[in-house]
Image: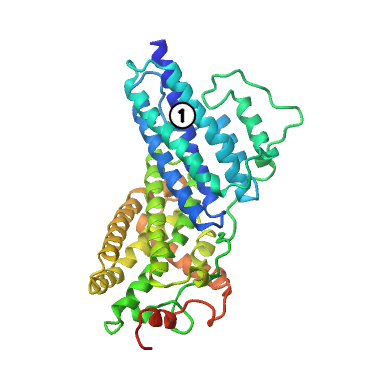
Amino acid sequence: MAAVKDMAGYLRALFEVEREFVSSATTLIYRVGDVELKYLLCQHVWEAAGHARFLRERGRELSGFGKGESVRSKFRNIFEEAISPNDAIQAVAGFYRVLKPALLSAYETYLEETNHLADWPSSKLVEEFILDEKRHAEEIQPYLRSNESSDWEKHLELCLNAVGGWLTHRPSVPLPDDFQWSFTDRPYCHPDTCNRGDYPVCSSVFGNEPSEDPIVREWLEDPKTDARVIRLMVYIWLMMELDAVDYLATVFYDTREAPFDMHFDLARHLWDESRHSQFGFRQLPKLGVDLSKLEHSLDLYNILVQMSPAERYAMMTMEFEAGSFPTKAKVMDRVRELNDFEADTLLAFDRNDEQGHVRYGHRWLPEIMQLLGETRPVAEFVDATRIRFEALAKEFGGITPHSLSPEERVTGSDLLKLATVEA
């Protein structure tokens, strides 16, 4: 059984690394400004969660995988160090030039050392994961600054060498006497606002003034509003689900001791929100909207980051998503008038996904509450959270000024013109 236990030990290490990638790489998402990079990170997190789940299920079939799902501190410390730079792209480079290549190497070592017939189920999984890791390296390359190894990357390599690599199969190389862990001096905390790079920003894209706001609330449900205008507004609404991407991403790091199944579902939720945002991001230019003039709303992140992870998740699933169904149902009916199959399809998947997200909320909110020592009944907690959100909105909402003047930015009046409807 020694061979089985050896390979099970490798699978356990790989599971822990993939799991910790999910809960730490998510801190990069709201810190980077490039929207396409945000989308890509969400995809990689979702794929890493899938790797971790398969590794756990296969590992449990083997003697020696161990019980529980916790990550060893020697691994966690390396990821804590990796997220510590203030420069988000430097942090991304550390993940993708040091930690992820070391993971690829660990997978390749697994294939070299196992018996492919005896351990066929593991081998086939690892072969697929190797392809994913190689693709991730190619996909991230355009977002990194240079091909030269930086002092920071060498710093992380020292951390990995000190534990003998992700499989801990190599001799450990002690850290230099003058080595200093960054995260012990500067514990990680979420930034007060999220990064949108070169895109213009504002507090909210919803309002009541066509000459000021791109999504005019009254128009959304007014049967007299032209369906083409409705389609443009709902695509903007979908694109602005990028704020959900940013604030949901904060929940992973704050709940690292939660059951892995919760992080798996949250990773799916995150990837769903990323895809929904892409619906708008990719469709709006086809309809004539200049994305460089469409402001991004920051209010929800700015408010929710002041709240506990349980409160953030409660507002997202029990309030925002559950509360959007009636309006989105009416919007879907109006868009069908256009016989736009692609728009119908995107909205249908958005609606289906969000119903699943509300189910996630009912399943996992009690777990997050328990993790944080919150003992109130769920309904009471959600009601109190709504009240607290409203109070925090008065302090932290509406504080992001418009980057562009009404004449420069996309407004409801502009959407009327784009839809060739007379104002």
The image shows residue 164 at horizontal and vertical percentages of: 58, 23
The image shows residue 206 at horizontal and vertical percentages of: 44, 75
Residue farthest toward the right in the current orientation of the protein: 178
Count all numbered tags in the image, as a single digit. Answer: 1
Which quarter shows the N terminus? top left
Residue at 40 percent of width and 48 percent of height: 266
Residue at image mark 1 = 14
Residue at 52 percent of width and 69 percent of height: 292
Which colour assignment does the render follow? rainbow
Observer-nearest of 362 and 161: 161
Q: Secondary structure at mark 1?
A: helix
Amino acid type at mark 1? Leu
Whether residue 259 is visible to the viewer of this picture, yes or no, is: no
Locate residue 181: give its quadrant: top right
Residue farthest toward the top in the current orientation of the protein: 1
Crowd rating for badge 1 (residues with CA inside 10 Å; few <14, some 14–19, many 20+): many
Locate residue 50: give its quadrant: top left
Observer-nearest of 144 and 301: 144
Q: Is residue 347 left or right of residue 183?
A: left
Q: Is residue 132 above or below residue 218?
A: above
Q: Is residue 53 above or below residue 207?
A: above
The image shows residue 63 at horizontal and vertical percentages of: 37, 18
Q: Is residue 297 above or below residue 408?
A: above
Q: Is residue 333 left or right of residue 148?
A: left
Whether residue 40 is visible to the viewer of this picture, yes or no, is: yes
The image shows residue 29 at horizontal and vertical percentages of: 52, 52
Observer-nearest of 227 and 218: 227
Which quarter shows the C terminus? bottom left
